[in-house]
């Protein structure tokens, strides 16, 4: 990396931190430190590393050191997956180089440390999660429509489709969504969701598939 590139890199990182919204975090890519030595191991191999993040709460910016792990199957994975959360690289003729750092909503993290901080300091439903929620509702609306079609011949799908439609229609109040999130979290504490064909299971699996970042005990993979 040239001196000019380093200067641009530092400017980008500082700008990203200053542009944080409440509840968001941004990585400092230069802070990455490996915690295991697998560089000369055969693929696949698991890298364990830690990074420093700036996260914005109501009290200001907090620095969090979080541990990540990534399974790499090749050199391409080494470049694209073994990075701090939110860091993007781009492919160039002779390999990969740093591209940008993207802030992310703290509850959608892949790290235990940031998730624990978010649970104590950041509501799941806030302005910073609006984009994620809108995406969730679009996905759930599509699932609901397909379930209602299948519900012409199945009561379970009909009931699930109607419930998911209600979740979409009450997106401002989120009463039903909150109830199902509590139920889903309770079920997951007892183990993975089963394969039973019931309306409840269809609903919970749909919420888990598209909105698991809202769960208190879930860390995004």
Image (cartoon, helix red, strand yellow):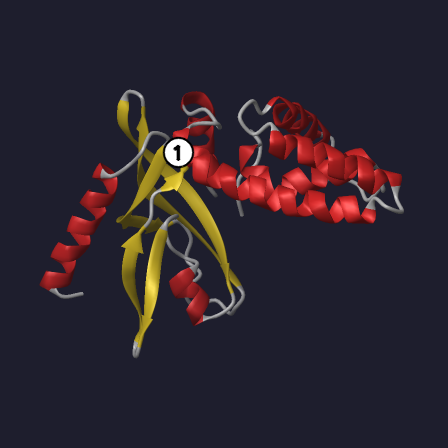
Report the residue at 18% width, 65% height from top.
1
Can you give x and y, in whole percent of width and height, for residue 111 in the image?
46, 40
Depth order, front residue of 77/91 = 91
x%, y% of residue 126? 43, 27
- Count of numbered circles on the image: 1
Displayed quadrant of residue 25: top left
Indicate whether 33 appears above or below 81.
above
The percent position of residue 56, horizontal first and vertical second, equals 31, 30
Q: Nearer the viewer, residue 21 or 149?
A: 149
Give the residue number, with chain letter if any, for mark 1: 128
Residue at 43 percent across and 69 percent down: it is 76
Q: Position of residue 79 (x, y in %)?
A: 38, 64
* Res. 117 image quadrant: top left
Residue 165, by quadrant, is top right
Residue at left 44%, top 21%?
A: 120
Is any part of residue 191 visible from this angle?
no
**In the rendered image, is residue 189 in sight?**
yes
In the image: residue 151, left or right of residue 53: right
Label 1 CA crowd tier, 10 Å (few <14, some 14–19, many 20+) = some
Q: Is mark 1 on a helix, strand or loop?
A: helix
Against 151, residue 187 (above or below) is above
The foreground one among 154 and 35 is: 154
Q: In this view, does 175 lie above or below 111?
A: above
């Amino acid at each position: 990396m040239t001196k000019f590139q380093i200067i641009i890199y530092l400017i980008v990182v500082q700008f990203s931190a200053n542009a944080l919204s409440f509840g968001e975090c941004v990585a400092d890519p230069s802070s990455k430190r490996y915690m295991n030595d697998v560089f000369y191991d055969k693929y696949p191999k698991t890298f364990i590393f830690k990074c420093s993040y700036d996260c914005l709460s109501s009290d200001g910016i907090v620095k969090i050191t979080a541990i990540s792990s990534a399974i790499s199957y090749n050199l391409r994975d080494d470049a694209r997956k073994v990075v701090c959360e939110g860091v993007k690289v781009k492919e160039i003729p002779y390999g990969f180089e740093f591209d940008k750092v993207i802030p992310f909503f703290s509850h959608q993290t892949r790290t235990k440390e940031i998730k624990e901080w978010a649970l104590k300091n950041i509501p799941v439903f806030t302005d910073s999660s609006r984009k994620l929620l809108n995406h969730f509702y679009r996905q759930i609306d599509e699932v609901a429509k397909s379930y209602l079609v299948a519900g012409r011949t199945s009561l379970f799908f009909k009931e699930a489709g109607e419930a998911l439609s209600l979740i979409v229609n009450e997106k401002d109040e989120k009463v039903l969504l909150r109830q199902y999130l509590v139920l889903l979290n309770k079920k997951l504490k007892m183990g993975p969701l089963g394969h039973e064909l019931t309306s409840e299971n269809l609903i919970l699996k749909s919420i888990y598939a598209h909105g698991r970042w809202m769960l208190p005990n879930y860390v995004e993979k």
